[in-house]
Image: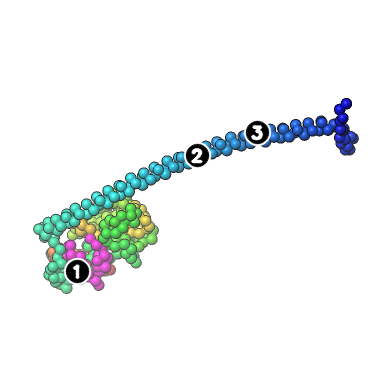
Amino acid sequence: MRQSYYVTITDYRGSRHFTLDQLVRRVIAGAAIGLAVVMVVGAVSILLLSNKVGSLNGQVAELAAEKENIRADKERLAGQRRELEREVRQRSRELAVLGTEVQRIETLVGLESSNERPLARRIDTAAQTAFEKRLMLRSIPSGFPVQSGRVTSDFGMRQHPIHDHEALHGGVDLRAKRGTPIYATADGVVEWAAVHQSSGLGKMVKLVHNYGFSTIYGHLDEIEIDSGSYVKRGDLLGYSGNTGQSAAPHLHYEVRYLQRRLDPSPFLRWSLEEYDVLFSEEDRVQWESLTEVVRTASRTPERPSLQQVQSLSATSP
């Protein structure tokens, strides 16, 4: 006869009796169920992690391919940059040759630099009347187009602030906060008063003056005059801004003579008090013949009206 052991469990509901074999079977069954649950959960977790690892491996492969493409693009761009630098050097040599040829042609047609001539032979400023001087100061660009102006970038070769390469700066940059009034530096007619895309100057005004001079005012925020209108020296043209290829608000100002860019610096300083500064520093203009034209025009029988004389006399240079 098999000997059995009983286990009695007593609580408030009474007593229950179990044989030891029944208890062991229940414990084993519970453990088996728990193990099965753990195995199922583990299998699902492993499957999910495997999918995640596969996805990450795919992303790593894509990043590696993208990195390789970036490296290839970098090498291609570096090659293009070397080619462009070589082309720029070649163009610079060609421009140097052309510059020599232009100087030779200018000499032939009488536009040669007048540095070798004494200043007294180029222009006798002492012989000019006050009326002639004021007339020239109104007709030829003089003074700053902005009040309390200060040059922040000079005329000549410089590192382009946007494209980061060396290029000719065909004018000067003047410090001017956005909305600073911009004034005409000489009497003239408005040739352009709109956005100028090809130059990168954004909203731009170009004035054409007497004797072959013109001025350009770039990166404006607002333009207050129309193309074709006439302006006097000191008239409002617009307000400074940051339009076009510009890193910060300022005014780009150019002075041209027969479409050739001149350094605006002596024109900015030119005034009745410093009247000789322009003629001594800018020698690409035939000042002697120009002043003779002004003198002849001012002494013709058709004299200026009293109102014109008073206007010129009252003009602050």
Quarter containing the C terminus = bottom left
Of callouts 1 and 3, which one flags the residue occurring earlier in the amino acid sequence? 3
Callout 1: SS: helix
Callout 3: SS: helix
Name the residue type under label 2: Asn
Of callouts 2 and 1, which one flags the residue occurring earlier in the amino acid sequence? 2
Q: Position of residue 265 (x, y in %)?
A: 26, 65
Using the image, determine if residue 180 lies above or below residue 49.
below
Q: Position of residue 243 (x, y in %)?
A: 35, 53
Q: Total number of numbered labels?
A: 3
Assess disc 2: are there few (<14), some (14-19) or many (≥20) residues with their C-alpha within 10 Å of its C-alpha. few
Contact flag, marks 2 and 1 (Cβ < 8 Å): no
Range of the magenta residues? 262-287
Q: Position of residue 112 (x, y in %)?
A: 13, 61
Disc 3 target residue: 40
Q: Position of residue 149 (x, y in %)?
A: 33, 65
Q: Residue at 27% of width from left, 51% of height from top?
A: 85
Name the residue type under label 1: Ser
Is residue 268 covered in magenta? yes
Of callouts 2 and 3, which one flags the residue occurring earlier in the amino acid sequence? 3
Disc 1 target residue: 280
Q: Residue at 48% of width from left, 41% of height from top?
A: 60
Name the residue type under label 3: Val
Judged by depth in the image, the label closer to the viewer, 2 or 1, is 2
Q: Residue at 29% of width from left, 59% of height from top?
A: 158
Contact flag, marks 2 and 3 (Cβ < 8 Å): no
Q: Is residue 256 left or right of residue 57?
A: left
The quadrant where residue 131 appears:
bottom left
User: Which labelled disc corresponds to residue 57?
Assistant: 2
Assess disc 3: are there few (<14), some (14-19) or many (≥20) residues with their C-alpha within 10 Å of its C-alpha. few
